[in-house]
Amino acid sequence: MLETSILELLVFSVLALFMIGGSIAVITNKQTIFSAFGFLLVMIALAGMFALLQSQFLALAQIMISVGAVVVLSMLTILTVNLKEENLPKEKNRYKWMIVATLLVLPITYLLYRSMDEAYIYFVDIDKVSSQVVGKLLFSDWVLPFEIVSILLLTAMLGAIVIARKDDTEQKGRT
Amino acid sequence: MSPNLFFLLASVIFSIGLVGLVSRRNLFIIYMSIELMLSSVNLILATFSRVLGNADGSVIALLIMAVIAAEAALFLAMIVHLYRSRKTIDSDQYNALSQEKNYA
């Protein structure tokens, strides 16, 4: 068992409140930029969760990648697209759909929770996961997935450039 | 503290992401819902890594984080491309591959 302390529980509650509130804000807001702020809140709280789980390296990586890169990129794109109120999709029934979807998803939530709850009993627990251990594993046992991920990132970058570029043939045809 | 709370939180966040994915039509919100689901998986992996005392979970979480970054770049580029082609981010408008011949 991991040791329980009141302070830890308090920090967990605050972070969990931020995460749940932020994710509800993401899916309920009509204005996209407010959703993005909720998303930012979730990502920062998730970094706090990683710190609470004593994996400092993951917390740092979460701050750097998710908060520093992904959220900022999302916000920049949202602000660049710059949709006006009347151009947003008209979702008059969105709360109705949300309630229906919630009812449908609730059993899945319960199933997920129960399965993980049952699974972890079979594991033993030892000390914290230090970044040294993670780094050593990353460059010994997991070096092939690591290299594959680097290729994936390169491909994604190229694909993003190719997709988001203005069409050359179109412009040539016009001039 | 017990990992049950973390599991419960991750399940709830995953489900909220799933609800947002199926019930909204704004492309940006669909994208952020997918990110929420991936992040909750990350939380589960980190929790298991801690409970199990095995750093493999942390390494997988790190790799998933890289996948999240790649997915963000591609998805946002795709949104920009789609918006440029039809001036809307309503996912219902993009039905060119559906069987109905309804090219709005």
Image: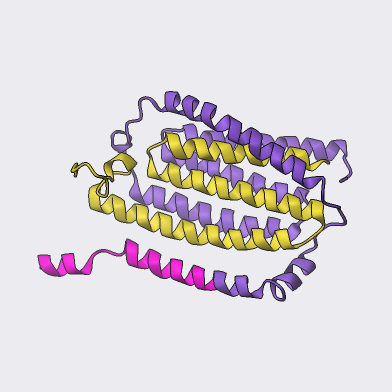
Chain colours: A purple, B yellow
Q: Which residues are magenta?
A: A150-175
Left/right of residue A79 with respect to residue A138 in the rendered view: left
Tell me the quadrant of the picture where the C terminus of chain A can be found. Answer: bottom left
Residue under the image location 82 percent in, 57 percent down:
B53
Left/right of residue A62 with respect to residue B32 in the rendered view: right
Q: Nearer the viewer, residue B85 or A14?
A: B85
Please say whether residue A153 is one of the residues in the magenta stretch.
yes
Please, what is the dominant secondary structure of the magenta stretch?
Answer: helix
Question: Is residue B14 visible to the viewer in this orientation of the structure?
Answer: yes
Q: Is residue A162 above or below residue A72?
A: below
Q: Nearer the viewer, residue A87 or B101?
A: B101
Residue B12 spot, x, y in % from top left: 62, 36
Residue under the image location 37 percent in, 67 percent down:
A161
Left/right of residue A3 with respect to residue B62 in the rendered view: right
Tell me the quadrant of the picture where the N terminus of chain A can be found. Answer: top right
Question: Is residue A15 visible to the viewer in this orientation of the structure?
Answer: no
Task: Count the labels in the image.
Answer: 0
Residue A96 spot, x, y in % from top left: 43, 23
